[in-house]
Amino acid sequence: MPKTELPPIYVMRSGDSLVGEMEADREWIRQQPHDQRIKVALSTGRSLSKLRFYWSFLGKVVKATQCAPSTETLHDVVKLHTGFVTPVMVKGFTVAVPKSISFSSMTEREFNTFLESAIEWIAATYGITPETAFGEEAA
């Protein structure tokens, strides 16, 4: 019988306890038998504001330079040039396939490293930094 994957629940730390973040999370916890042992895999959430910043920055670079037809295309180019790829063999040739930066694909620390590399590569390639793209907002 195939294993059914349950959606994650999110919790917030309250003293020494973890409390469901939303009512649905707390309800799932209440439905578990009293004194039942529950395995928890800890990870902290990714910063949505950093992800928004990254996409906004790419948009400003595309608008200022016309370097790519879309932010998504520039995103793939950035991943290729920063080495954020998976090498795949195709008919005897190694092809670089851009990796995903989705929340489930990387940790916050990995995203921070990627973001720093992306900003450095864009600055070196197009001469645009967050400071020049956003003005005083980025400082």
Image: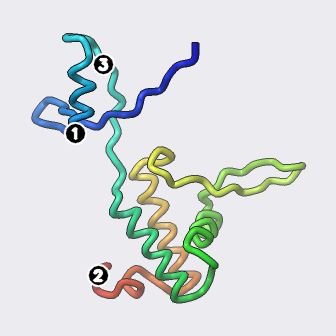
Query: What residue is rendered at 67% in x and 51% in y?
Result: 86
Residue 52, percent across and down? 39, 66
Asked whether the residues under the numbered discs 3 and 2 touch, taking CB atoms below 8 Å apart as contact, a structural biologist would say: no
Q: CA distance from mark 1 to mark 2?
A: 31 Å
Residue kind at label 3, given as amino acid type: Ile
Q: Quadrant of residue 79?
A: bottom right
Residue kind at label 2, given as amino acid type: Glu
**For the residues carrying marks 1 and 2, which lies nearer the camera in this image?**
1
**Within-10-Å neighbours for mark 1: few <14, some 14–19, many 20+:** few
Query: What residue is rendered at 33% in x and 47% in y?
Result: 45
Q: Is residue 18 above or below residue 4?
A: below
Sooner in the amino-acid sequence: mark 3 or mark 2: 3
Farthest residue, direction right: 91
Q: Is residue 125 above or below residue 6?
A: below
On-image quarter of the N terminus: top right
Residue kind at label 1, given as amino acid type: Glu
Residue 74, percent across and down? 59, 72
In the structure shown, which secondary structural element does the residue marked by tag 2 occupy?
helix
Q: Quadrant of residue 85?
A: bottom right
In the structure shown, which secondary structural element does the residue marked by tag 3 occupy?
loop
Residue 90, percent across and down? 84, 49
Query: What residue is rendered at 49% in x and 52% in y?
Result: 102
Q: To which residue does mark 2 refer?
A: 137
Q: To which residue does mark 3 refer?
A: 38
Residue 2, percent across and down? 57, 17
Q: Nearer the viewer, residue 13 or 92?
A: 13
User: Would you say 65 lies left or right of 23 here?
Assistant: right
User: Would you say 31 lies left or right of 84 here?
Assistant: left
Q: Nearer the viewer, residue 57 or 130?
A: 57
Q: To which residue does mark 1 refer?
A: 21
**Within-10-Å neighbours for mark 2: few <14, some 14–19, many 20+:** few
